[in-house]
Image: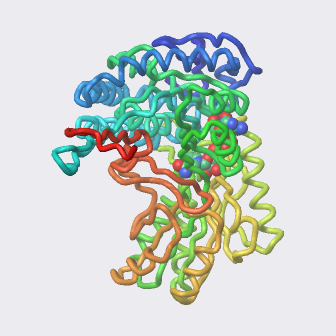
Amino acid sequence: MSTGSFTVSQPLNYRGGKRVQPADGSGTEEAYEPATGRVIATFQCSGEKEVDLAVQSAKAAFKIWRKKSGMERSRILLEAARIIRERRDEIATVETINNGKSIFEAGFDIDISWQCLEYYAGLAGSMAGEHVQLPGGSFGYTIREPLGVCVGIGAWNYPFQIAVWKSAPALACGNAMIFKPSPFTPVSVVLLAEIYTEAGVPPGLFNVVQGGAATGQFLCQHRDVAKVSFTGSVPTGKKIMELSSQGIKPVTLELGGKSPLIIFSDCDIENAVKGAMMANFLTQGEVCCNGTRVFVQREILDKFTEEVVKQTQKIKIGDPLLENTRMGPLINRSHLQRVLGFIEQGKKQGAKVLCGGDLYIPEDPKLKDGYYMKPCILGNCKDDMTCVKEEIFGPVMSILPFDTETEVLERANDTTFGLAAGVFTKDIQRAHRVVAELQAGVCYINNYNVSPVELPFGGYKMSGFGRENGRVTIEYYSQLKTVCVEMGDVESVF
Ligand SMILES: NC(=O)c1ccc[n+]([C@@H]2O[C@H](COP(=O)([O-])OP(=O)(O)OC[C@H]3O[C@@H](n4cnc5c(N)ncnc54)[C@H](O)[C@@H]3O)[C@@H](O)[C@H]2O)c1
């Protein structure tokens, strides 16, 4: 498959074990190939009736699935993982075409996806309650039960991976799921739905509805939906919480960030430079946990800056389906303009562009309408600049000098976000002392933006709550039933 050749002809909704056209609509959307600016799919957004049909279909599948043992569910999830591994390159290609990230990176996203399924398949058989002895031979026990029909709503930056991070633990716990991807990236999630069916889940256990805000609202408001897990921006997260509160539905919110990366002068500079690039330029900088506020201790500011600029200028931008490309186009034109706007505003407020920050026009004529820009590093930054305070969600790193540990901790925590943070130092005591003070859900020591599925991921403060990945996520997709058993006579107070 080459860039400029892919179009979607099949329906993008998935219900009852097959692709379907939605029963009703709330407007139409177009999905693009960011590398060329071509429309690759036009689809109807699902209306209230389609959402209800998806919920009914999921309810029917849930009745079958919840009765299966953990080991039976595990076997099916392992089969889904195997199919994803086998179809890795094909899924990664679709992801690259619809999202714009390099094929090199998309392959890793698919690897993390099958690993996530393997991890929760491994936990499915070990889910159990406890037995508690009570006086007189009476006893109690607890059962960990699924919630029912869960909704997953995703962002466009990791379309396939987000759908797996939500559905793998949900299904392992015995739930059904309806997933709504971002209308910008509707394509790869349907492949996941087909894979679950092929692996043997009951038809309807994982359904896909397409659409934007209106479709998402129908899902959150549906009376038979037990839980909503959301990945996206803070403003939408607030709305999801509000809507879900009407039905007292638990929510998981994976929201935005403006994370600090602190580089002390005693670090290994080469690793710190690599870490800063990993923290800023994966998926064109469109990553929630990016460490975009790079605090550098003054003694090494010049050396670090020189090296990170040199390495950033070497990043190969271009056709994302080519193996040697490391940065593709941004998701769409309006987002590209928004990112460039942050850079312009930064310049007006006194920041200095050290590299990039302008449009990139590839030589290949078929890419001329794609949404490319050169990765940007801003120097001379101050904490109160817009580019330092707000989530840009593009390839823009801000460098901020600091002098002392106390000072940098204060500045690093001075934000309403709290998704991630990083520290580079060779001083082991300092590393742990700093991490203990950082107000962030995910902290990295001497690395950045690695996401092993065994570790929980999620935010503090306005970056959300609840966790994805790791053992703890089981608690967010299950509920505890207490059973109290009397072995003697009832001692009534009446
Ligand atoms: N913390 C994380 O794990 C994580 C991961 C990826 C992205 N993000 C965040 O996501 C944001 C970028 O993604 P985006 O632009 O797709 O976010 P967004 O909030 O615009 O949209 C996210 C999803 O919500 C849906 N939606 C929009 N309005 C809705 C409503 N009123 N009710 C129900 N659903 C609604 C959208 O259609 C989409 O599917 C960034 O802020 C980024 O930091 C967070």
The residue lying at 45 percent from left, 13 percent from top is 17
Residue 349 image offset from top left, x and y in percent: 81, 72
Question: Toward the viewer: 493 or 353?
Answer: 493
Which picture quadrant has residue 110? top left
Most foreground residue, 449 or 466: 466
In the rendered image, the vertical position of residue 340 relative to residue 228, given as above or below? below
Q: Is residue 161 above or below residue 366?
A: below
In the rendered view, would you say 391 is above or below 149? Answer: below
State left or right for residue 344 relative to residue 215: right
Residue depicted at 39% across the width and 17% down the height? 197
Q: Nearer the viewer, residue 11 or 228?
A: 228
Nearest the viewer among 177 and 198 is: 177
Position in image of residue 259 (x %, y %): 57, 64
162 horizontally vs 126: left or right: right
Picture colour scheme: rainbow
Which quadrant of the picture is home to ligand 1? top right
- Residue found at x 77% / y 67%: 346
Image-based side of 459 in relation to 202, left or right:
right
**Percent position (x, y) of residue 87?**
37, 25
Q: Relative to 377, is 91 above or below?
A: above
Report the quarter where the C terminus lies. Answer: top left
Residue closest to the far left: 137
